[in-house]
Image: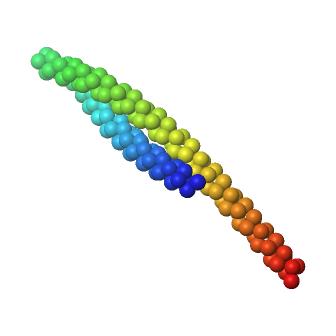
């Protein structure tokens, strides 16, 4: 029985290590998603500020060259926003994938923890049964030894 116990504990150790690795990867994916989200937010904020500035200038008059330059800059900013939205979407999908892997590893680890608990309980009950049997035998031997005198 001890051989199996050792194997189960080794498997549980490996499963816990896999779960920890999955947790670390998930935390890194969350961090990456947040970084990409902040970059997108900053781009959108810059675009909003630029458009506000452009509206103010249009109301007060702006040379055509400056208007073209501002429109070109806003166009490039919109391209950057679209590119960053794709990055955020990719980071979100990656984060969700890592979350699923963490859930799977947690479930797998829990299965082995339950098996380990059941095996420990079985061993404890078996040891208790053996001890009780041994005490019973000792009592019988003691009784028979005293009655034969």
Which of the pair 111/9 is nearer the observer?
9
How far from the left and from the top, in percent, is residue 25? 37, 41
Q: Quadrant of the N terminus?
A: bottom right
Camera sees residue 64: yes
45 relative to 106, above or below? above
Q: In this image, 16 relative to 87: left or right?
A: right
Q: Quadrant of residue 90?
A: top left
Residue found at the very far left of the displayed protein: 65
Residue 74 picture location, percent across and down: 22, 22
Name the residue at 88% across, 79% down: 147
* Whether residue 2 is situated above or below residue 131 in the rendered picture: above
The residue at the point 41 percent across, 36 percent down is 98
Pinpoint residue 47: horizontal percent, then vertical percent: 27, 27
Residue at (29, 22) in percent of width and height: 82
Q: How many marks?
A: 0
In this orientation, which residue lies closer to the viewer: 122 or 92? 122
Quarter of the picture containing the C terminus is bottom right
Q: Which one is nearer the viewer's eye here, 90 or 2? A: 2
- At x 71% / y 66%, what residue is drawn? 131
Vertically, is 66 above or below 147? Answer: above
> Can residue 23 be seen at all in this image of the molecule?
no
Tell me: 17 left or right of 69. right
């Amino acid at each position: 029985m001890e051989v199996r116990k050792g194997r189960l504990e080794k498997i549980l150790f490996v499963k816990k290590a896999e779960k920890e690795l999955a947790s670390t990867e998930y935390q890194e994916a969350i961090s990456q998603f947040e970084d990409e989200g902040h970059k997108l937010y900053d781009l959108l904020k810059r675009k909003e500020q630029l458009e506000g500035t452009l509206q103010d200038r249009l109301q007060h008059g702006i040379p055509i060259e400056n208007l073209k330059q501002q429109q070109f800059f806003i166009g490039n900013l919109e391209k950057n926003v679209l590119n960053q939205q794709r990055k955020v979407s990719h980071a979100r999908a990656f984060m969700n994938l890592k979350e699923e892997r963490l859930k799977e590893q947690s479930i797998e680890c829990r299965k082995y923890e339950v098996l380990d608990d059941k095996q420990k309980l079985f061993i404890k009950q078996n040891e208790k049964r053996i001890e009780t049997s041994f005490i019973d035998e000792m009592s019988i031997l003691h009784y028979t030894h005293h009655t034969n005198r």
